[in-house]
Image (cartoon, rainbow, N blue to C red):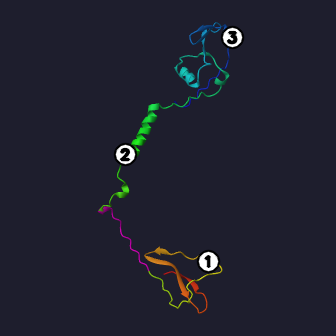
Amino acid sequence: MPDSSLVVTVPQPCHENWEQMTSAGRGRHCLACRKVVVDFTRMSDAELLRWFSHATDNACGRFRPNQLDRPLITPPRLLPRWYHWLVAGAVVWATLTPTAAAAQRPIWPDQHLRPLFVRLQAPRVAAAPLAEATETQFDAPIRYAQPLPMPIIMGGAVTGVRITVLAEPQRLPLLQLEDWLR
């Protein structure tokens, strides 16, 4: 059941003494109003909602102070224990059931991918003799005024950076970076 918006209020409380009323059924009989006063003090919110949903006319009742002037809340309905076992069994069954892995299936002829053609051009490198040193070390980090373009494939051709290695005698190789856009 969803939460109810039923709020119990007593606009004109009765001043009769509960102990002086005679017992009758689920409550006591009031001689002043000649009605049966129902004892709601031992009922939960769900029981109060059930009682008021089946009531046919106004009723006199005895309430605890914490039952008045607040919305009556229905506790959440708990699922039966067998339902939890059923769900657990279904999970175990689904986990242990052998199935063929989708990654192991062959690709059928109608599922072939369209070939991709890419034309690559090798950059032109100036041929020059290198210094005799086999290792090159830089003492300071290389700094660039502008960011270098990254190689990009556009329209089947490769564009990017061309590196020219020039060697001068008795010096470290000099790197020249040039934009190479065609």
Give the residue displayed 61% in from the left and 77% down from the top: 146
Classed neighbour count for the residue bearing mark 3: other residues with Cα under 10 Å, few (<14), some (14–19), many (≥20): few
How far is disc 1 from disc 3 in space, using C-alphas? 94 Å
* Kind of residue at badge 3: Asn
Measured from the top left, where is residue 60 in percent x and y? 61, 15
Report the predominant secondary structure element of the magenta stretch: loop
Dividing the picture into quadrants, the one containing residue 166 is bottom right
Badge 1: residue crowd in 10 Å (few <14, some 14–19, many ≥20): few
Give yes or no for residue 104 being in the magenta stretch.
Answer: no
- Label 3 or label 2, whichever lies nearer to me, is 2
First in residue order: circle 1 vs circle 3? 3
Q: Which residue is mark 2?
A: 97
Q: Which residue is mark 1?
A: 146
In three-dimensional space, the C-alpha distance between marks 3 and 2, rounded to whole angstroms, equals 70 Å
Residue sitting at 41 percent across and 40 percent down? 90
Q: Is residue 13 left or right of residue 58?
A: right
- Residue 17, numbered circle: 3
Q: Nearer the viewer, residue 55 or 137?
A: 137
Q: Amino acid at mark 2?
A: Thr
Q: Which residues are magenta?
A: 109-120
Q: Secondary structure at mark 1?
A: loop
Q: Which mark is residue 174?
A: none
Determine if the magenta segment contains residue 116: yes
Residue depicted at 59% across the width and 20% down the height? 43
- Seen in the picture, residue 35 relative to 158 is either above or below; the reply is above
